[in-house]
Image (cartoon, rainbow, N blue to C red):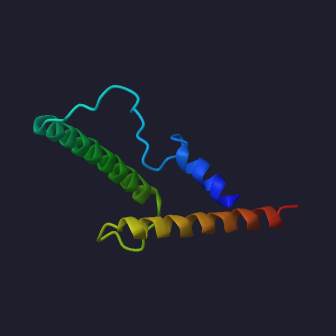
Amino acid sequence: MEGECWCQFQANPQFSIMSTKKKRGPPKQTTTKEVVKKRRLAANARERKRMTSLNVAFDKLREVVPSISSERKLSKYETLQMAQSYIAALEKLLQNADGSSP
């Protein structure tokens, strides 16, 4: 019985491993080197814009987070660590203020 089931499975073109299906949608267009270059330039411009925006956000965060030394700019990692510590300290301060109030 297993052999019959396997034969039926093999005989059905819907389940055949070797069956080929027609692709749907418009045929693929080959992209020229010029199109690829324009797309890459556009993607690079978007990435530069994204990174600039991210750096501006880090600069704004550095302005509000207290730092130990003003001689050098904190790295992104240090800025995030300081922001996390600062938020935790503010949270403790608020909890202590709420706890001491009648």
Give the residue displayed 25% in from the left and 47% down from the top: 48
Give the residue displayed 40% in from the left and 32% down from the top: 22
Specify the quadrant of the image occupied by residue 12: top right
In the rendered view, does 20 fall on the left or right side of 15?
left
Give the residue displayed 14% in from the left and 41% down from the top: 37
Residue closest to the eye, 100 or 24: 24
User: Residue 78, position in %: x, y?
Assistant: 41, 70
Q: Is residue 2 above or below residue 92?
A: above
Give the residue displayed 41% in from the left and 29% down from the top: 24
Point out the image quarter for the N terminus: bottom right
User: Residue 88, position in %: x, y?
Assistant: 62, 67
For this orientation, the residue located farthest to the left is 34
Q: Is residue 29 above or below residue 89?
A: above
In the rendered view, does 7 fall on the left or right side of 77?
right
User: Residue 56, position in %: x, y?
Assistant: 34, 49
In the rendered view, does 38 fall on the left or right side of 8?
left
Total numbered labels placed on residues in the image: 0
Residue closest to the eye, 95 or 78: 78
For this orientation, the residue located farthest to the top is 26
For this orientation, the residue located farthest to the bottom is 68
For this orientation, the residue located farthest to the right is 102
Residue closest to the eye, 72 or 48: 48
In the rendered view, does 24 fall on the left or right side of 52?
right
Q: Is residue 19 above or below residue 35?
A: below
Point out the image quarter for the C terminus: bottom right
Specify the quadrant of the image occupied by residue 63: bottom left
